[in-house]
Image (spheres, helix red, strand yellow):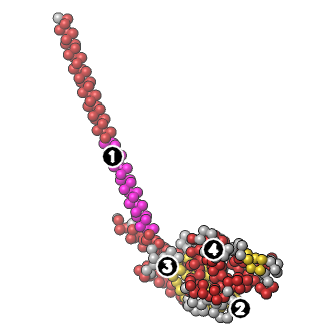
Amino acid sequence: MKKIKRKSNKKRLKRNNFKILLLLIISITIAYCVNNNEIEKKANELTNNIVKKVDLKDEQSEHEKCLVSKYTDADMSENLKNKIEELNAYLNNYNLSVYYEDITTGFTYKYKEEEVYYGASLIKLVEALYLIDKASTNEINLDTTTVKYLSKYKAEDSIGMDKRNIGEEVSLRDLISYALKYSDNTAHFMLSEFIGISNLREYGKSLGAVNILTGGDSYGNQSASDTNIYLKHAYEIMQKNTNYGAFLKECMTNTYYNYLYLNEENNVAHKWGLHSIYFHDIGIVFEDNPYTLSILTTYGKNDYKTIVNNISKKINELHHLFYSERENKCHQEIYNKKN
């Protein structure tokens, strides 16, 4: 009888072990399934997040491309038309010319842009561009190439050269700096003779200018269309020329006068010119979306500072309205189409 009991206990033990093993297998299977579901769920969530990020990145890329796409007539909204009509009505009160161009998109506003004015010191920017281009192709060196300061060059309004002595050799870099920062006339005469009027005239024409050194002296005539060409070339140098871009920008943003000034940031690289009845201010406004602006006037004996500054503010309003309209249009085209 004892043996039978031992066998019964063994059978019970085996059954219990089998149950335990079965429960263990079932538990492992359940755990595996649960973990598998969790893993699959996590994987799906991760995949969905990646897809969403990719879609969002694609949308952002499309949106950015839309924002910087070239201007077409389809961009001309009623709000922009009204703003331009308002600006035209305002400018009709003055004898002047205006040329504005958004550098990225090519959106422009022009007012009597082909009218010709005595350019005065605006020619100094062209001289600087000519010499920087020559230095960029290693035809000259702005630091080692010098011009001897002769008494025949001495002129009024020469803040930079007044600190130099007759007979002194002055580098091209210093002369450019004086001509742009202080509109130094002595520096201009030295640069003009070094370059040669015919060479500078041909250079201006090669850039696309029409009125370059017409009028019989070393200053010559300009139109707002001409000066816009020079400003766009100056911007290209500032952005792409690693050797001289920073130098040009520093000279044009640290000037004695700046009537295109809009706020406390020193964000306008410009050149002004004043002679008799003429006052002009042309420059590049560095905002998130930079633009060129030329204002040429016959108000050299009037309150030209206020006139030019008010016009520059109105142009800035037009510029921001354009980008507000562009932003709305791009948002509608890129994001709303997916909803």
Q: Nearer the viewer, mark 3 or mark 1?
A: 3
Instruction: Indicate the position of residue 92 as horizontal and vertical percent values.
Output: 57, 91
* Residue underneath mark 2: 276
**Element under disc 4:** loop
Residue in the image at 37% along x and 50% along y = 46
Task: Give me the C-alpha separation between circle 2 and circle 3.
Answer: 34 Å
Residue in the image at 65% along x and 94% along y = 215
- What is the magenta segment's predominant secondary structure? helix
Looking at marks 1 and 4 on the same chain, the residue that comes earlier in the sequence is marked by: 1
Looking at marks 2 and 3 on the same chain, the residue that comes earlier in the sequence is marked by: 3
Q: Which of 145 and 216 is in front in this view?
A: 145
Q: Which of marks 1 and 4 is in front?
A: 4
Give the residues drawn in magenta, as a range.
Answer: 37-64
* Residue underneath mark 1: 41
In the displayed structure image, the side of residue 219 where residue 104 appears, left or right: left
In the displayed structure image, the side of residue 40 where residue 265 appears, left or right: right
Task: Give me the C-alpha separation between circle 1 and circle 2.
Answer: 80 Å
* Residue underneath mark 4: 138
Q: Which amino acid does label 1 sit on?
A: Lys
Task: Give me the C-alpha separation between circle 3 and circle 1.
Answer: 50 Å
* Residue underneath mark 3: 106
Looking at marks 1 and 2 on the same chain, the residue that comes earlier in the sequence is marked by: 1
